[in-house]
Image (cartoon, grey):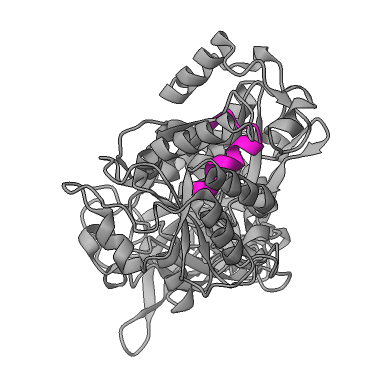
Amino acid sequence: MAHSSDATDAPGHKPANFLRGIIERDLEAGTYAQRRFAGSPGDAAHQATGQPDPAKIRTRFPPEPNGYLHIGHAKSICLNFGLARDYGGICHLRFDDTNPEKEEQEYVDAIVDAVKWLGFDWQAGGTDHLYFASDYFEFMYRAAEALIAAGLAYVDEQTPEQMRATRGDFSTPGTNSPYRSRTPEENLARFREMRDGKLPDGAAVLRAKIDMASPNINLRDPALYRIKRATHHNTGDAWCIYPMYTYAHPIEDALENITHSICTLEFEDQRPFYDWLLDKLCDLGLLAQPRPHQYEFARLNLTYVITSKRKLKQLVDEHHVSGWDDPRMPTLVGLRRRGYTPEAIQLFCERIGVSKADSWIDYSTLDVALRDDLEGKAARAMAVLEPVKLKLTNWAEVFGSESHREACSAPAHPQRPELGARRFSLGPEDWIERDDFAETPPKGFFRLFPGNKVRLKYGYVIECTGCEKDTAGQVTAVLAKLVPDTKSGTPGADAVKVKGTITWVGVHDALAAEVRLYDRLFTEAQPDAAGRDFLTVLNPASKKTVTGYLEPSLATAKPDDKFQFERHGYFVADRVDHAPGRPVFNKITGLKDGWAK
């Protein structure tokens, strides 16, 4: 959790990275030791009334509420909350809600839920550090007026096309707007007309006055405000002008006393404007020193997924998937429904590390972390997913009655005796996997074929005698004889040597369940590489639904309960559709990487 902690919490065991190095140097130098915090976000005057900040550092996770969080966000969440936790700091959850057209309360609620599910919170010292950029609109407006009054911003009424043309490019400097020479008084009057709704949408923007010849295009008088009549999810219709993200974000950081503003590499070019803006607002006395600083790291590029919110929304809207929480989606709600654990995702984020160099992480790395987490947790169970009937033709002869049921048991988990045993029984008819029988076996096949013996796991050795077929030649039942005195765990059980052991479920006590076998959503490692239409590489086999037969111990499984189906992989009771009398299980991942070359 992101909470205040002692300096002794500083990690000795965590892998070093450049961000930890920066934070440790700042702590050693006392860079932020003089900060004051009045208990809530605010300007320089507000913070000056506070006590020395109890948080040694402050970080923030600042999503825009315009979609559901995905695995890429998990890296940022684990990084920001984890660094705050490890260095006696506090991490804020802040919604960057400056774009009213795309933001919805549904996304706000989903983001709060996802961050909590991952294992983090934003409570510290009795304070809830959940904030909205839109709560700072009044200050942002006041800061804009201060910039105008200082001759550092102006209202530009060129058309968007004219502004693009005068901006220049990497080889050509920009040219000044004809409106750039207006006096502060003229600009202030015009800006207030923008605020008061006297100008139509798109008629004017407020721009910073920096340098139209700057080699960094982001410093060529960037836009600070635009006119947009749109109802905001938080402020309603109070405003018809809205701040640009690049203007709002540094101000949000400063108001919240953020020390280390950590973002992905695509914001590196914006850092000079981040610094310019905060320096000017500190000089004007509106914001407190020491101010925040921005640091960039490489975003997560994971193979076989896309993380563009726009493209994920397209998958949902066009019904290529069943929703944001479809278990094939890389969204956190999708991963959660698929059966991934918060611990596995945290472990994955820790293992891939943090750097400034872009790279691609193979999806199998996430599954390795998942298996490492579930191996010690998930109870075991037998399941038959492509069933064919096994008939033990000498059952009555061995047990004296066709109605006899032979009790069997197995540990719920081989390394966790405290979980107890699971109980099931063998009968004259049982379900086995269809591919555990071959009428004409290939070389190296040690399972059922006429004349061969195998062990039914936790049960008896059987000898295959043949099969039954329908008129189309399809095998409808496998025939075998039970070998007496070979029950697992009884004296002399291993007197008959076999090379194969197969899983099974008794027909009489099997739990019939809907089992959803999920695979990767795309067939290509980089689905949208080089501008490719990612829909052309959707994997048609990414979901297969079968009726499986499960051992009776799974009848009490609750939504989100996870199991290892022996031989098959890890499965979870679906958190949406699983219900008493209607079991539904999702395949999370196999026991090993099925895509390994």
Residue at 20% x, 54% y is 443
Looking at this view, is 481 or 14 the one in front?
Answer: 14
Above or below 315: residue 488: above
Does residue 247 appear to the left or right of 157 in the view shown?
right
Boundaries of the magenta span: 247-260
Image quadrant in which the N terminus is located: top right
Tally of numbered tags? 0
Residue 561 seen: no
Q: Is residue 372 visible?
A: yes
494 or 147: nearer the viewer: 147
Q: Which residue extends farthest top?
A: 28
| Residue 253 belongs to magenta span | yes
Rendering quarter of residue 424: bottom right
In this view, the residue farthest toward the right is 126
Image spot of residue 430 (x, y percent): 54, 67
Residue at the spot 58% in from the left edge and 41% down from the top edge: 251
- Which residue is at the front of the view, 120 or 189? 189
Quadrant position of residue 253 = top right
Residue 365 position, x and y percent, is 39, 41
Q: Characterize the magenta stretch by its predominant secondary structure.
A: helix
Residue positioned most to the bottom? 471
Q: Position of residue 487 (x, y in %)?
A: 57, 48
Vertical side of 419 occupied by 282: above or below = above
Image coords of residue 281 (percent x, y): 56, 36
Residue 182 among magenta residues: no
As drawn, 147 above or below 482: above
Residue toward you, 157 or 63: 157
